[in-house]
Amino acid sequence: MRTPVVAGNWKMNTTLADATALARAVVDGVDGITGVTTVVCPPAVSLVPVSMALTGSNVFIGAQDVNPNSQGAHTGELSADMLAGLCTYVIVGHSERRSLYGEDDAITAAKARASLGSGLRPIVCVGESLEVRDTGNAASLVASQVKGSLARISDISQVAIAYEPVWAIGTGRAASPEIAQEMASTIRSAVAALYSDEAANGIPILYGGSVNPDNAVSYAASPDVDGALVGGAALDGVAFARIVDAVAASG
Ligand code: 13P
């Protein structure tokens, strides 16, 4: 049985004060909810105060990115070892990293390997553009992203994968539950082909893209969708907690 994961990606939002207040609201909102792993991913500068605000709670913390190198002359970057003291999870290969910062599957895989090497759990993001979907190539593109983004990773037991179609992110145009299920199943099959059925059946596959408290339950009901990676709605502690609750209720 897979435990669903609901992760909030705060992206480049929240000041230090906002982040602490939001973390407290999430802690209060999800208090008593069981059967779901709740994660918040604040901006790097807020990891310390947010981790303090989460102390004693059942909410985990994740980073939004990591540098694949272990140390050295990489001005402005953070290594997996630095994050490991603070975080449990780290998002890698988000479509905004891919499209705005030119990151490809090879860099994503290097980040995932660095994360695993430091004991962090990577949330590896994949997803097609609207153009790829419209030309009928979404499944093959996403399967190839999965393969490339897990390159040279031998043990995926600590990996989660997030299916985030680019056209659904921040647009209010969420993928239908049918598309989310079909793509999550495609991803699980791709993982099974690369590893084993057992490995594929063990990993959480999240859906991300305009998830809100009202639609969360429809994804949670899909057999291959094991939770959500939430952007905009994660900036409202009450809305985020409602998503966590919806996923818990359908478990
Ligand atoms: P939205 O929920 O704002 O569409 O963002 C999704 C996302 O990119 C989470 O990583």
Image (tube, rainbow, N blue to C red):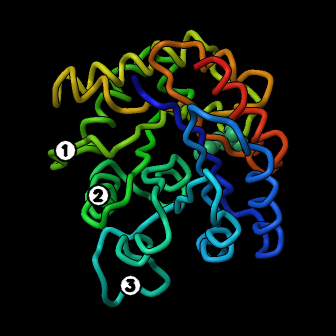
Q: Badge 3 is on which residue?
A: 74
Amino acid type, label 1: Asp
Q: Earlier in the sequence, mark 2 or mark 3?
A: 3
In this orientation, which residue lies closer to the viewer: 136 or 97?
Answer: 97
In the rendered image, which quarter contains the N terminus?
top left
Q: Badge 1 is on which residue?
A: 155
Q: Badge 2 is on which residue?
A: 116
Q: Is residue 7 above or below residue 80?
A: above
Q: Earlier in the sequence, mark 1 or mark 3?
A: 3
Which element carries disc 2, helix, strand or loop? helix
Question: CA gap, disc 2 to disc 3?
Answer: 20 Å
Q: How many marks?
A: 3
Taking the spot 76% from the left edge, 76% from the top edge, the residue there is: 16
Q: Position of residue 207 (x, y in %)?
A: 55, 30
Ligand 1 quarter of the rendering: top right
Q: Are marks 1 and 2 in contact (CB under 8 Å)?
A: yes
Taking the spot 76% from the left edge, 67% from the top edge, the residue there is: 19
Q: Position of residue 242 (x, y in %)?
A: 78, 33
In the rendered image, which quarter contains the C terminus?
top right
In this orientation, which residue lies closer to the viewer: 56 or 193?
Answer: 56
Amino acid type, label 3: His
Q: Earlier in the sequence, mark 1 or mark 2?
A: 2
